Each structure stands twice: as C-alpha cells, then as structure tokens.
Amino acid sequence: MKRLISLVAVMTALGALAGCQNLGVQPWERDLLAKPVMTPGAADGLDDALDDHIYFSKEASSGGRGFGGGGCGCN
C-alpha cells in the first residue's frame, strides 16, 4: 500500500512539473503577438459595442465609457 501511495505521489509530482516545462514566449514567437489583430478590442468595434450594451444595461446608465462609478451616480 505504501508503494502504491509513493507511486501516485511521484506520478502527480511529475505531472505537475510537466506543466512548467515551457514558460515564457520565445523571441521568434513575439512577432505574432505584436500584430495589431492581437490587441484586445482592436479587431472590430462590434465587440466593444456589445460590451458597452451589456455594461450600460446592467448599470442603467449610458455614456461615459472611461468614467468611474456606476449608474447610481455615486463616483
């Protein structure tokens, strides 16, 4: 029984360490991440419009996209 528990513990540790083998972005992969398409919200305005619609529906307000506070008027 101890051997089985030890085997399970070792296999779990190896599985956890396998997830850490590739950390960071390689230099040749950075050009793909630097493209304008990869910028959040830059692809098209439809996503931003939908996000605004959902936000303003929940907050019962409109306008002031970059403004702090909620629809209740408390800032």
Image (cartoon, grey):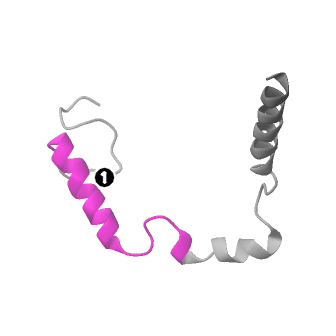
Residue 18 percent coordinates (x, y): 79, 50
Residue farthest front in this picture: 1
Q: Residues within 10 Å of mark 1 (few under 14, many from 20)?
A: few
Residue 37 falls left or right of residue 50: right
Quadrant where the N terminus lies? top right
Residue 39 magenta: yes
- Provide the residue span drawn in magenta: 37-61
Q: Name the residue under label 1.
A: 65
Q: Which residue is drawn at 43% across and 75% down?
A: 43
SS assignment for the magenta stretch, majority: helix
Q: What element carries label 1?
A: loop
Q: Which kind of residue does numbered mark 1 sit on? A: Arg
Foreground: 68 or 46? Answer: 46
Q: Is residue 4 above or below residue 15?
A: above
Occupied quadrant, residue 3: top right
User: Which residue is at 76% across, 63% downward?
Assistant: 25
Give the x, y percent position of residue 61. 16, 45
User: Above or below — where is 18 with respect to 42?
Assistant: above
The structure residue drawn at horizontal position 82% and vertical position 43%, both measured from the top left corner, is 14
The image position of residue 8, as x and y in percent, is: 77, 34
